Image: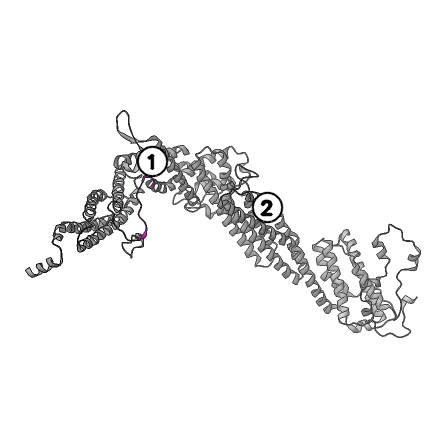
Amino acid sequence: MSSNIQTLTKWMPAKIVDYSGAYDSCRELHSKGLRLIEKISYVLSNEDDKFDPKIKDIAETLLKVEEKFADCFRALQIEREHVSITKKFKSLRHLAWKTKQKLCYVLRALINELATQFVFSEGGVTVVMLRLATSYNNLLAMDAKFNVPRNGNSVCKNTCPYLLFPLKKFSVTRFLHALARKRAELCSHKLIDCLLDTYKTYDGSDDDSGSDNSSLEIYLALTKHMSPPANAEPPGEKTMKDDAVSAAAESRASFANIDEIIMHEDSNVTDLLNATLGVCPAMLGPDGIKKSKSTGESKVSKTAARKVADYYQRILWSEVGSHLEHVILWWAPSPLAARPPRSSQHLREWINQFIPTADMPQSVISALTCLADALGVHVTSTLWDHSFRRALVASKKDYDGVTGQLFTNVMEELVCLSNLCEVTPDWIVGAPLDELPLVEQIPVLHRLDHSVHTARLWALRECRKRANGWDVRAFFSITHRDVANCLTQLGGLRTNDHALEVEKGQLGVHVEVCTLMRAKLVSEVKENAAKLKDTPNQCVECLASICKTINLAHLKMIFPGKRFWKGGGAVVPEAPCGYVRSYLEKMLIPVLRTTADHQICNMVLTLVCESWLDHIYANKIKFSSCGAWQLLCDFASVSAWIEECPVIDQATRRTLLKNEVLKRCEGVGKLLLRNPGERIRMIDKQLRRKSVSDHSSEEESKEHMPAEMYVPNQEQWLELRAARNKFTFNPLCC
């Protein structure tokens, strides 16, 4: 044994025996700290909301542990000693620091838990909370006071990511934030009660409240936050408003107006300041404490108390503004979000009308503004989701005339929401950029741009589909009615140009970015609106290309064969063939019945006749003299059919009869009757004798032109004359 002591004395300094008490006290502190951590963890795991009496014992034990930590760090501050002693000191100091850090983390959780309960519990909770906060702050201050070295990231255990969070001292403002978060929901309900009282007066003085159901929607929105009886049945439409009023009257507390709510919250702040003055006055700072001239007692400065109360009101109503949305929209038994989006829009419009005339503090008005903005965002997303989804689903089905109206409704709602963002409660026109709800308008314009683009693609796709089936009624219903209705709604979009204000500068970064993004979306909306305006022309071009194909297909089925046109006869035909009426009724009548557009009617008539001529020429049909007379009679019957058609108005009839394609068809028929080498007279002899006056119009001169001159490729048509006998009867020679 003596040899071991001699060996130990040989390698270790004899002075190490003088620090054995410090070593033992550090180890004892470590064990006490772990036991205290276990007690705090047990209290935190207790789910009972009542105040645990063990917390008072924890506060008393913590004071003793705090003193021992200070003694331990003070005893381990010696640096100029043997290397082995210094190394031992560093190891024990790091162990003590780790224990202190763990204790601070669980202590912070306990203080945060008490900070949410001290308003609703007895006064002793506030005192215990402040005592724990004082000890917590003193423990944190030891690192700087005793120059305790720490690891770079303050990690005590790698298995606990929560320890990575930095520790901060508790202050009065930190307690105020905790109090505001706890009181925000209750104040939200009380504020809604005040709004309901205000709206009852507002609605009673409104003579036009019965014009629509917006009044009922607002009553429902303001009363749904109250929990109805469990066995209550849904009220009928007639008694719904009365039930909402009675429920509001029964559930309202003693707070008749907003001033009483503010006074009650100020009293909570006063209680907290008085408790802080008695337990830990250092938290109030030198400017927050003032000594009484008469008694010499310390008291909270009135200026500091007023500043703290104002600060608390700001953060409280800021929290209320974020809670109001959830209370009204989501947290009620029958939330407003479950009702149609128009209900939220009614409430939002009423709040925007109420704010300019409200006699409330600015912090409360800011909370109502946040609620109005949140309702606007909710309305924008849900209203567009609801209406656009209906339009999109309907666009995948067969056209029934409803899809276009659904797209029109989408644009009407979005245009209305966008126009509301162009004004403020104080400005009708010319509102400053920093007062406009640009953040709210940006998603509205984005959705409007997407809706216009989708409506345009639907119109093009559906028109092509209807044109392929020659369903011109649905085709013109889309181009003439649906697209026109959408353009009418887009015409009401108000988008003021703020480029000059952006060029001047002096705008915040956020406002400038939002303004530029809004300008970009406005340009995209206008570009898509211009494309939508040109969509009917594109659809008509598509109709023209399809019309010619359908004409040729129909003629292939009904046009007489080649032998019919080569046949001969001694009698000149006077009646048209039956295929002419069938052809015109199939291709022309549906168009004339559904549209009065002269250009489209003329276009279809031109395509009908040109397809007729193309079918003849493409199949190289040869015509005898009798066949040529029959074809000329068929062509002439088109003009007669137009004059007798009952579905054509007089203006359209006059326009169709002036179509040059009728002259071209007549000219083809006369060319087929000409003999080889026969010259065409440019004007009749009787017309040649008449002098042409100076004021004669170009149309009158064209009427004097022979029909053959309207045919551009006369030589090709002359090749379709069948071989004839030398003495064939030709009435043109008589």
Tell whether 156 sits left or right of 680: left
Using the image, determine if residue 428 lies above or below residue 717: above
* Magenta segment boundaries in residue numbering: 164-173
- The quadrant the C terminus occupies is bottom right
Which residue is pictured at 32% across the width and 31% down the height? Answer: 301
Can residue 409 be seen here? The reply is no
Q: Are marks 2 and 1 in contact (CB under 8 Å)?
A: no
Viewer-closest of 545 and 221: 545
- The quadrant the N terminus occupies is bottom left
Which amino acid type is marked by label 2?
Leu
Can residue 583 be seen here? The reply is yes
Residue 77 - label: none
Q: Position of residue 646 (x, y in %)?
A: 76, 54
Q: Position of residue 295 (x, y in %)?
A: 26, 26
Residue that mark 2 sits on: 493
Q: Position of residue 51 (x, y in %)?
A: 26, 42
Please report whichever mark, 2 or 1, sits nearer to the chain's N-terminal start: 1
Using the image, determine if residue 73 lies above or below residue 277: below
Using the image, determine if residue 422 lies above or below residue 592: above
Viewer-closest of 622 and 360: 360
Which amino acid type is marked by label 1?
Val
Residue that mark 1 sits on: 269
